[in-house]
Image: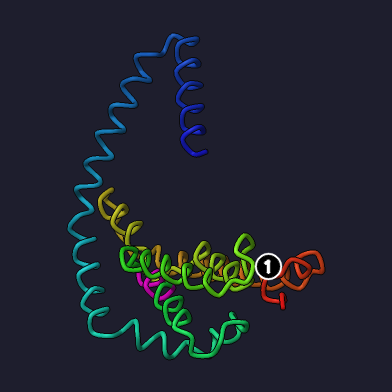
Amino acid sequence: MLNYIWLFLIIVSIVVAAVNGRLDETTKAALDSASSAVEISFGMIGIMALWLGIMKIAEEGGLIEILSKILRPLARFLFPNIPKDHPVIGLMLMNLIASWLGLGNAATPLGLKAMESLQRLNKKKDTATNAMVVFLALNTASICIIPMTIIAIRNELGSLRPYEIIGATFLSSLCATIAAVIAAKSFERLKIFKENDPDLLE
């Protein structure tokens, strides 16, 4: 779908530029933007490599596992239908914590493994369980403690205080996560969704 949207926007911009006689300016702007994108990407390598290296050391040192143990009581509230001490809880918590810390490369495989495990627990394979919905909501909203990509872009574009975005990003992502969880937990209580709830099948 996203490809179709991009194609639509490109076609519209070309047509509008041609109608207004500004096709040359549109072509120049496209080439300049592509060049800037490459420059910014290369400029981000240093700061991204530094942060991801630090977090990789923390990951190898067991930081994510320690945090996941601390957050297990919260997991019992969020995913009450998953058996206690099931391995999928650890996978989900490690995925979420890796996302919070900006470890996208570590978060993705953990998230895929967690969703596979949730599907194995699912009694109705063509319908998402409440745990799947809550986990997806948490992943989509995702609290962001260190928005490393944004910081790197701000730094590359010459921001005097590239790290000042941390507070606003954390607060907004926290609000989004709380809203997502409240919505997921509220919808699962509605009769229309309870009738198809895989967790309630005998």
Depth check: give the residue in front, 180 or 133: 133
Q: Secondary structure at mark 1?
A: helix
Q: Position of residue 73 (x, y in %)?
A: 53, 90
Q: Residue 96, percent across and down?
A: 44, 73
Q: Amino acid at mark 1?
A: Ala
- Residue 161 percent across, percent down from the top left: 31, 61
Residue where numbered disc 1 is placed: 183
- Work out whether 121 lies above or below 14: below
Magenta span contains residue 173: no
In this picture, residue 23 sits left or right of residue 46? right
Q: Residue at x 53, y 68 (%)?
A: 119
Residue plotted at (20% across, 70% down): 53
The picture quadrant where one finds residue 190 is bottom right
Q: Identify which residue is drawn at 34% across, 81% down.
A: 64
Main secondary structure of the magenta stretch = helix
**Can you give x and y, in whole percent of width and height, for residue 116 in the image?**
46, 68
- How dense is the environment of label 1, judged by Cα within 10 Å: few (below 14), some, or many (20 and up)? few
Give the residue displayed 50% in from the left and 9% down from the top.
19
| Tally of marks | 1
What range of the chain is rendered magenta?
96-101
Any magenta on residue 99?
Answer: yes
